[in-house]
Image (cartoon, helix red, strand yellow):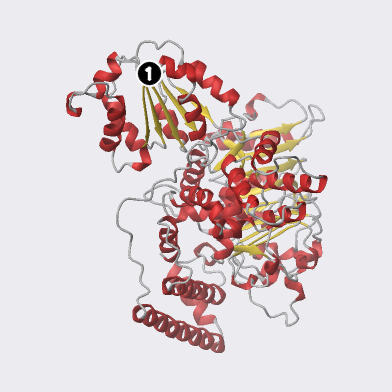
Amino acid sequence: MISSARDSHMAAGRDPASSSSRISMEEMRDLAHDIEDCIDRFLPCPCVACQGQGEAASVLRRVKKAATSARSRFAAEIHKLRSRLKDAHDRRVNYQAVNGSSAGASPAAADTGAETDPVGIDEPKQELVDILLQQTGPGKPGVISIVGFGGSGKTTLARAVYECPGVVRRFPCRAWAVASEHRDAEGLLTTILRQLRTTDAPLPQISMDGFLRTTECLIVIDDINKQNWDVIKSILPREAKSRIIVTTALQSVANACSSGDGYVYKMSILNAEHSKVLLMKKVFFQGCSPELERGSTAIVEKCDGLPLALVCMAKFLLGENELTGSHCARVCHNLGHHMEKEADFTKLQQVLVNNYSSLSGYPLRTSLLYTSVFPNGRPIRRNTLIRRWLAEGYVQCQYKRSDLEVADENFRELIDRNIIRPIDASNNAKVKTCRTHGIMHEFMLHKSMSDNFITSLHDQNRSNFRHLFIQNHASGSTLSSNQRTSPASDDAAGSEKFRARSLTISGDAGEAASEFCRCELLRVLDLGECNDLEDSHLKDIHKLWHLKYLSLGGTISNLPKKIDKLHCLETLDLRKTKIEVLPVEVIGLPHLAYLFGKFKFGKKDLRKSEIAEFSQRKSKLKSLAGFYADGNPGFLQLMAHMKELKKVKIWCESTGADNKGLPDISKAVQKFAQDGMDTSELSSAANGAMPPSASIC
């Protein structure tokens, strides 16, 4: 509720930074975090499956078993928190720091306008003009949809096509309207019809249907939404000579508008060459020195091909007294701060705020902010992102859908809004990897730091943040100078408590590699890209009772003996490690759903009692990719008891007809087929022929 209130202020253009409302919200947020931390520290593992009993009985038993002194400390902490909460509430009332909901409709998207001297649109302009000048065929009127991320130049391209001399000659009757400037579709239609009117007859006597049926009209609707289109398409005649161009940030809206004989054009970002040309035209009119050339390159990389970002950056640089390469680098380094404070970035800030605030609900906005914990410019695996959302608790399931279904829907919405950019797709056309726009990443990271949500482990205020990262890549996110300090390991007292729920390390961790266990409330520990982690650094990892997601990198060769203490673990990603043998205790973790790597099973053969014990635990394993079948039947003996397993990858070597492992694999797969498993999701990396009965593709 606190975060939603702040988002409402931001979306409405109100800055509560110096108001009592901002102070009160920050106080309430810190209180909420302290309450959550208190409960998590006292009940480090309250999950039902770990205790084997009902939730209430589980919690009661833990409280009863706790030492009297611990219970007294817990009670004292609760009393202190209740007192703080009462005082905060009194201050909130006394100083009227209450945020009412803003009246009126939701904020409209910022009108970025059309760039007067566009760069890099000649080819797309000609493509759309050629389509526009084609003869219309039977059926519904053709609709050209221009879709893309806010600030990518949709309006500029539409305006260039609209004002093209050949288009003007073909369509002398034209209309341009901005949908977001109207409260309803009726007002939008009135504006269009007023521009199309060619007689002195009263407006009500001239219908939209009549114009479109008898006259070659061109209508451009900028920033259209689904509600606008539903009203407009209902009055369009099935046969018309007119053409319609719409712009939108939503892929689904573009597809709906251009269904049938329409055309969808998806905006692409400017390449480095066009970005440099645009910047040179706006700032560096007469060339620049090699040193300034390097500075301009840094600007081009930071703006990530977004025309509006380049234009705003150029306006800001023109007002600076000092224009050197080092100054350009400093501006890039503190771009988030400049976007928030400087008037030259107002238009860009409005677009980015609208991209964020228009998302449906706080959980989805939080999920988007969470993407800024990954290094800027580097691909993010879709499945990795979704599993981390689930581990963090940022997916709120409604109705009878699963958390995974909701997370997948959230991801699709971010793709649909072009906020997350797909990079490639898997065989079933689902997005496999993605990345956020560079300038959007900068905006989100700055907002996250302002809200104590995400920061570097090297930040001097790190103990107040929910998510920490270390990035040692050139493309990584930047921190301002006052946020750079010594790593956590330099804390002399060694008693600093972290409230972080996740830690992501990319590159070298340095001394911090041996300190992550001080973040005792971690739910996500992503060390898959860490270059200097050693096996010894994991010796105390079992103390992270809340850990749900663990990824390890290529420097790890063995799992610690107490790995089975991580009862809450849901995802274990060992694909990049050197681990070859998997302890059988890992398979028995009560919440483990996703296990990735390529390993052999730790036991040759299991006793019936061990198999029976595993069966009673009701394995939640959904994906295992995968294990190496070397004649060891251990894992295959357990497969029949993994009722939720949907995907398994098996590596095996075929040495001829006497291979002893293949019959066991065939038997295990047939067992799954009999139990109704979707065998189309079974996969194998086999170096030899598999028997047809194995049903492995």
Q: Residues within 10 Å of mark 1 (few under 14, many from 20)?
A: few
Q: Amino acid at mark 1?
A: Pro
Q: From the viewer's perspective, is 335 left or right of 536?
A: left
Is residue 92 at least partly visible in the picture?
yes
Up/down of 136 relative to 191, above or below: above
Toward the viewer: 681 or 170?
170
Judging by the rendered image, the residue that carries numbered circle 1 is: 172
Question: Residue 333 sits in which quadrant?
Answer: bottom right
Residue 432, x across and y down, in percent: 61, 38
Give the residue at x 62% y 30%: 120
Toward the viewer: 613 or 460?
460
Q: From the viewer's perspective, is 224 left or right of 695?
A: left
Up/down of 644 relative to 39, above or below: above
Residue 355, x across and y down, in percent: 48, 47
Residue 566, x across and y down, in percent: 64, 63
Give the residue at x 54% y 24%: 125
Is residue 646 at least partly visible in the picture?
no
Q: From the viewer's perspective, is 454 left or right of 552?
A: left
Give the residue at x 45% y 83%: 84
